[in-house]
Amino acid sequence: MTRLLEQAVETVSTLPDDVQDELARILLQLAGVEQPSYELTPEEEADIDASLAEAERGEFATEEEVRAMWAKHGL
């Protein structure tokens, strides 16, 4: 294992379990290991449906709202 991969694994190991699992799935997919399809929870499905409905109505964040969101997360 390379030093960079060791550093990444060490860093990821400090994150919450659900985040670790998601990153592990992504890494396995990139390595060509097939992963089972992700099953959405009913809450996730409802959130996606609400987002799609907002998009159909043309309800999008303004540039100012997007900048504020990025700033909130230090990006």
Image (tube, rainbow, N blue to C red):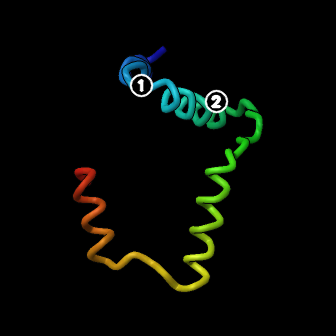
- Residue furthest to the top: 1
**Side of 50 relative to 5 (left or right):** right
The one nearer the camera, 5 or 42, is 42
Looking at the image, which residue is at 73% across and 42% down? 39
Q: Which of disc 2 and disc 1 is earlier in sequence? A: 1
Q: Nearer the viewer, mark 1 or mark 2?
A: 1
Could you say whether the residue bearing mark 2 is in a helix, strand or loop?
A: helix
What residue did someone put label 2 on?
Answer: 28
Please tell me how many numbered marks the rendered image carries.
Answer: 2
Is mark 1 in CB contact (under 8 Å) with mark 2?
no
Tell me: 42 left or right of 3.
Answer: right
Indicate the amino acid at tag 1.
Val
Rendered image quadrant of residue 45: bottom right
Which label number is shown at residue 12?
1
Residue 37 screen position, x and y as percent: 76, 41
Which residue corresponds to the image point at 38% horizontal and 17% vertical from the top-left?
10
| Residue ID at (27%, 68%) | 67
Give the CA distance from mark 1 to mark 2: 14 Å
